[in-house]
């Protein structure tokens, strides 16, 4: 863990093409696509640690950092250049909506998936208007979460230009 409760570690690479582990059998490490780089942001440390453990258990995902408030998320997103930011909606210092707005303003590259314990339509509208690519419930199945992360990376990497989430 770094300062202010931030974990920073990871590995670099180029093309992101999520594949199922069984599709990679028999390929060397040099032939495999680089894992999707994910930044986890949630003020509930137990939940954040569980997300990190879940995502890190999938070889198609590289958890490059963890933040516990929106302010740290903005800094880490600029520093680490993740493919995906899993962002809690409600946090201290700066909420997920404002952090998403600032991250997307600084760079259109990271896809932000907003996480919330609720499913209010107003929250969904706020998240997408700030630039979030999606809105996920915290009570979803773990396999669905991994699928959402890999799915948004596949969509973004297939697009010749960064996703324009303002349209």
Image (cartoon, rainbow, N blue to C red):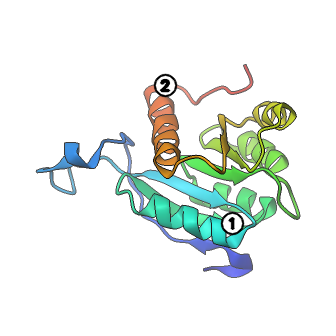
Within-10-Å neighbours for mark 2: few <14, some 14–19, many 20+: few
Residue 133 vs residue 156, the one in the foreground: 133
Marks 1 and 2, the one that precedes in the sequence: 1
State the residue at coordinates (46%, 41%): 147
The quadrant of the rendering that contains the C terminus is: top right
Please say if the residues under marks 1 and 2 sit with CB atoms less than 8 Å apart.
Answer: no
Q: Position of residue 49 (x, y in %)?
A: 59, 70
Q: Check the image and name the residue furthest to the left.
A: 26
Residue position for label 2: 159
**Number of numbered tags placed on the structure image:** 2
- In-image side of 133 versus 24 (left or right): right
Check disc 2 and report its element: helix, strand or loop.
Answer: loop
Q: Looking at this view, is 8 or 63 the one in front?
A: 63
Q: CA distance from mark 1 to mark 2?
A: 28 Å
User: On the picture, is 155 further left or further right than 124?
Assistant: left
- Residue 154: where, in percent of width, then height? 44, 34
Position in image of residue 70 (x %, y %)? 79, 58
Secondary structure beneath label 1: strand
Answer left or right for 27 relative to 112: left
Quarter placement of the N terminus:
bottom right
Instruction: Using a 10 Å C-alpha cutoff, classify the residue at mark 1 as few (fewer than 14 neighbours), some (14 to 19) or many (20 or more).
Output: many
Q: Which residue is mark 1?
A: 67
Is 90 above or below relative to 121?
A: below
The percent coordinates of residue 84 (x first, y second) are 57, 47
Residue drawn at 74 percent across, 25 percent down: 166
Give the answer, above or below, for where 159 lies relative to 149.
above
Farthest top residue in view: 167
Residue at image point 80% right, 61% down: 71
């Amino acid at each position: 863990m770094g300062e202010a409760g931030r974990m920073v570690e990871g590995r670099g690479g180029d093309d992101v093409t999520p594949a199922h582990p069984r599709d990679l059998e028999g390929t060397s490490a040099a032939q495999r696509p680089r894992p999707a780089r994910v930044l986890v942001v949630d003020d509930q440390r137990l939940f954040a640690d569980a997300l990190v453990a879940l995502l890190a258990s999938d070889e198609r995902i590289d958890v490059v950092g963890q933040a516990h408030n929106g302010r740290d998320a903005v800094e880490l997103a600029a520093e680490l250049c993740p493919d995906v930011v899993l962002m809690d909606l409600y946090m201290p210092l700066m909420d997920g909506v404002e952090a998403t707005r600032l991250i997307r303003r600084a760079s259109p590259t990271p896809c932000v998936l907003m996480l919330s314990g609720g499913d209010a339509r107003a929250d969904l509208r706020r998240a997408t208007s700030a630039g979030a690519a999606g809105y996920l419930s915290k009570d979803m199945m773990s396999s669905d979460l991994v699928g959402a992360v890999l799915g948004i990376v596949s969509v973004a990497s297939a697009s010749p230009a960064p996703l324009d989430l303002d349209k």
